[in-house]
Amino acid sequence: MSQAKGFAAAAAKAPLTPYSFERRELRDYDVAIDIKFCGICHSDIHQVRDEWGGSIFPMVPGHEIAGIVTAVGSKVTKFKVGDKAGIGCFVDSCRTCEECQKGLEQYCAKGAVWTYNAKAKDGELMMGGYSDKIVADENYILHIPENLALDAAAPLLCAGITLYSPLRHWQAVPGKKVAIVGLGGLGHMGVKLAHAMGAEVTVLSQSLRKQDDGKRLGADHFYATSDPKTFEKLARSFDLIINTVSSSEMDWNQYLSLLKVDGSMVVVGVPDKPNEVASFSLILGRRSLAGSAIGGIPETQEMLDFCGEHNITSDIELIPIQKVNEAYDRVVKSDVRYRFVIDLASLNSN
Ligand code: NAP
Ligand code: ZN
Ligand code: ZN
């Protein structure tokens, strides 16, 4: 066992405070990583505040982990000491079900072992990336391309793959019109990735406040959803809508009306309340409503390599860990451009 330190929430809605715990001994296929940076995903906030139910405390959140390998187990072949390495939302899965065999471990029939707020097969309470070190099996760790800055690459491990996977699956290619709803952590990665894939990209944001950023990130068009004319003007416009909104205060039917015939709206945001969908929103246009969760290990590596080739990282605001509670409040107010990333070196300052 090795002693680790980080920040944890002791109970639902409690602020995050300094916390010491133990990381497991290196097993044969384990890799030890010194965590340098960890992104703040809105899912961290949902779970710390127990908005999805069933949260386990104490909780060290964090699943956008970027760091450097410090030790490897005796049978590790994929990593060596000094490598840049990343960990996303899960660190293990059953490895035998159909989904695991296909590299879609996030949909593991027995449930993937999440990076935090979860228990491993042997009962180990998982602790995430708001900490100085982590140990995980090499098969669930990613290589971060050399040319990408570690701090700005950290959010690729969740925000990046969560948008890359549906953009690939629903084929955001040249000639396709793609709308990204919500220009937050996920949304801004969606704009960069869809643009790099060659699609025509529209941002649907609550206001025009972030319009200049949207264009800079690669959007061709930008509309405010607070303006009712937007929905008239854009009716039947899109092949694909990716909905990243974290709040239930939106009418999915309105957004479905923006799809062309045979268009799809893919939901990736996870609000705490269900949304109502009228059959006619789908029927009159042969439209599809779908969902998508992060991505499997092979696709996450493919996304990182794609980002390496295209020099894509996240736009970040780097913060010391002592500012994490303040950062949570700002994310909830949509006041982040566009991902907070924690500099774990700050754990050593008072
Ligand atoms: P975020 O940075 O807070 O972005 C969410 C964006 O949604 C905001 O920036 C805002 O964009 C928009 N929004 C917020 N409240 C809204 C409202 N009441 N009405 C309309 N739009 C609103 O969060 P994130 O980290 O990108 O995560 C977004 C959601 O995805 C969260 O629910 C998170 O749990 C979930 N998530 C899912 C997966 C997955 O695998 N499916 C992975 C990661 C995260 P504008 O300011 O542009 O309007
Ligand atoms: Zn996440
Ligand atoms: Zn499985």
Image (tube, rainbow, N blue to C red):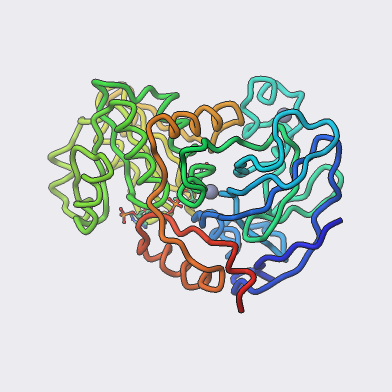
Toward the bottom, the furthest residue is 350
Residue at the image point whose x is 77% and y is 44% from the top: 71
Give the left or right position of residue 295, taking residue 183 as reference: right
Q: Which of 222 and 136 lies nearest the eye of the viewer?
A: 136
In this rendering, the answer to whether 181 lies above or below 299 is: below
Residue 89 image offset from top left, x and y in percent: 61, 44
Give the left or right position of residue 91, taking residue 294 as reference: right
Residue 346 quadrant: bottom right
Give the left or right position of residue 154, taking residue 192 as reference: right
Q: Which of 314 and 124 lies nearest the eye of the viewer?
A: 314
Residue 138 image offset from top left, x and y in percent: 73, 35
Residue 155 visible in the picture: yes
Residue 44 image offset from top left, x and y in percent: 56, 57
Q: Which of 149 and 153 lies nearest the eye of the viewer?
A: 149
Toward the front, the furthest residue is 82
Residue 272 visible in the picture: no
In this rendering, the answer to whether 121 lies above or below 249 is: above
Give the left or right position of residue 290, taking residue 47 as reference: left
Residue 262 quadrant: top left
Quadrant for the N terminus, please. bottom right
How many labels sit on residues?
Answer: 0
In this rendering, the answer to whether 109 lies above or below 34 is: above
Q: Which of 197 and 2 lies nearest the eye of the viewer?
A: 2
Residue at the image point whose x is 55% and y is 32% from the top: 300
Quadrant for the C terminus, please. bottom right
Residue 84 quadrant: top right
Residue 234 image offset from top left, x and y in percent: 17, 37
Residue at the image point whose x is 36% and y is 28% from the top: 264
